[in-house]
Every structure is written in C-alpha cells, then in structure tokens.
Image (spheres, grey):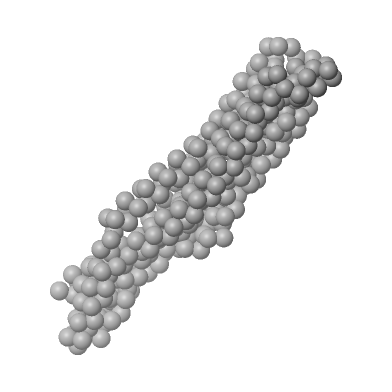
Amino acid sequence: MADDIERRLASAAEALREYEVTTSRSTDLRGRIDEMATQLTALRTRHDDELKDVERLEGLSLTRVLASLRGSRDETLERERAEADAARYRVAEAESRLDALRREQSAAQARLDQLAAAPGDYAAALDAKDHHLRQSGDPRRTRLLALAEERGRLTGEIHEAAEALRAAGTATQALSRVRETLDSADGWSTFDTFGGGGLLTSAIKHSRLDEAAEEAARADRSLAALRTELADVPGAALTAPQLAIGELTRFVDVWLDNIFTDLAVQDRINQAQENVERSTQLVHEVRTRLEQRIAQARARLDAIDSERHALLMPLGQY
C-alpha cells in the first residue's frame, strides 16, 4: 500500500510538472504567434508598396517620365524590382516561421489535452498521502512520501533539460553549416571584388549566398525551437529571450537590404559571420548550463535513492 502511494505520488508530480511547463509553453507560443502575425502584416504592406513603385516605373506615369528624362529609368526600375523581390522574400520567410510556430502551438495544445487530468490526479494523490499518513504510525512515512514527490519533479526536470540539450545540439549543427557556407561565400566574394573575378566567379558567389541564406533560415528555426525548449527548463528564463530571432542569425536582414555593390555584399557577409559566431558561443554556454543542470538533478536523484534505501532498511542492518 505504501509503495503504491509513493509511486502514484511520484508519477502525479511528474505529470503535473509537465502540465505546468506545457501550459507555459503554449502561452509563450501564442504570444510569439501574435507578434509574428503583426510582423507579417507589416511585411505584406511593405511588399505591396514596393510593387506599386515598380508598377509606377513600368507604366505610363509621371515617375517614369521624370526617371526617363534623367536617363536613370532602367537603373531605378532595377533597384525597385530588387527591393520588391527582397520584400517578397521576407514575406515568404515570415510566413514559414509563423506556420512553424502554429504547428508548435498546436502540438503543445494537443499535449495539454492529454494532460488535462494531471492537476486533479495530483490533488487526489495528495489526499491519498494525507490519509495514509493519518492512518500510519510509522514516522518514516512523511519523509518517504516527500522524497517520492521530489523524485517525480526531478524526473520531469531532467526530461525537459534533455529535450533542450538535444535542441541545442541541433542548433549548433545548423550554425556550423551556416558558418561553412558563409566562409565559402566570403572567399568567392573577396576574389570577385578584389581579384577581378568574372561572370563565373559572380555566379559561384551568388550560389553560395543562396546556400547561406537557406542554411541561416534553418538555423533560425533551430534557435526558435531551442528558445521554446528553454522556456520549459527552470532557471533558463533569462537565456531564452537572448535567442529571440531577429537579433542573431537573421542573415536575410543582414545582407538583403540595398545590396548593389560587391563591397556591400562583402560587408554584410562579414556581419553575418560575426552574428553566427555570437550565436554559436551563446548556444555553447546554454549547452554547458544544461549539462550541469542534468548532472545536478541526477546527483540529487541518487541521493534520494540512497536516503530512501537507508530509511527502509531494518534497524541493525546499516
């Protein structure tokens, strides 16, 4: 009977912990979805404005006439088309990120539905514990049940930290791939700018930039996933905001604005490399703290098992 109550209390404490962190995760994701939806609306508006600029130059308008008189129409039209393409790229990227957030939130809500009984089960386990303690004259019962509850909570925390650690590993790999493609783009860009590269060199450079942009988008998603997992880990709340997308590896925003010269491309590649290095260092620090947290929790579980064993051993057999 006593062992059953211990197991029930430990299981209920673990389920309650997961229910609480999943509730927090769902709330955080809803806030980020609202924020991203607002950003997407603004980006779509900007894209529409850029398209109107292109249409004014392409059609018969005062803008086109004035640009033609200045002899700059073709150059201006190319610039406007480039800015429209950049705005469309940002819209597509934001739509992808919003879809990913919605999928995460849907998964969190589904898990919450599965855990709906957790608060009630935990309350029932506490009632059973209280009833057993009143019925039992054994002074060890209070401590044993307290250890069982702590064991359940720690088991949940280890699970959460392990998931965050896996997400950090994925983010590290993604950032490494960004670094590799940026290094390649950097080499070709330097040669194209200062070494007199021709059409082939420019084509290779732009191909590497496309690869770097794709890898950076994957890294952004990996960092977003890590941020979500960190929100579930006790004590990691101060780290999660630092992983907010838009401050670290937003490679598109680093180099997409107003790139019309090779020197501008080179400068933005250098900025992206610096941002990736900062991101990598931050993720490394996160991984170290998570590993320490898991080690501490496991050490405490070992101590709980030792104390429980000592309490249950018959007198005279220590």
Height in image: 202 above or below 9?
Answer: above
Height in image: 114 above or below 128?
Answer: above
Q: Is residue 310 visible?
A: no
Height in image: 185 above or below 286?
Answer: above
Q: Which corner quadrant of the image does residue 157 belong to?
A: bottom left
Q: Which corner quadrant of the image does residue 63 belong to?
A: top right
Which residue is drawn at the image coordinates 62% and 23% (left, top)?
208
Q: Quick one: which residue is furthest to the right in this view?
A: 70
Locate residue 210, reporting x and y percent. 60, 25
Q: Quick one: which residue is furthest to the top in this view?
A: 199
Which residue is drawn at the image coordinates 45% and 41% (left, top)?
100
Locate residue 263, reporting x and y percent. 78, 27
Q: Quadrant of the C terminus?
A: bottom left
Locate residue 256, reporting x and y percent. 67, 32
The answer to which of 276 and 96 lies nearer the viewer is 96
Which residue is drawn at the image coordinates 38% and 57% (left, top)?
22
Q: Quadrant of the N terminus?
A: bottom left
Q: Is residue 139 visible?
A: yes
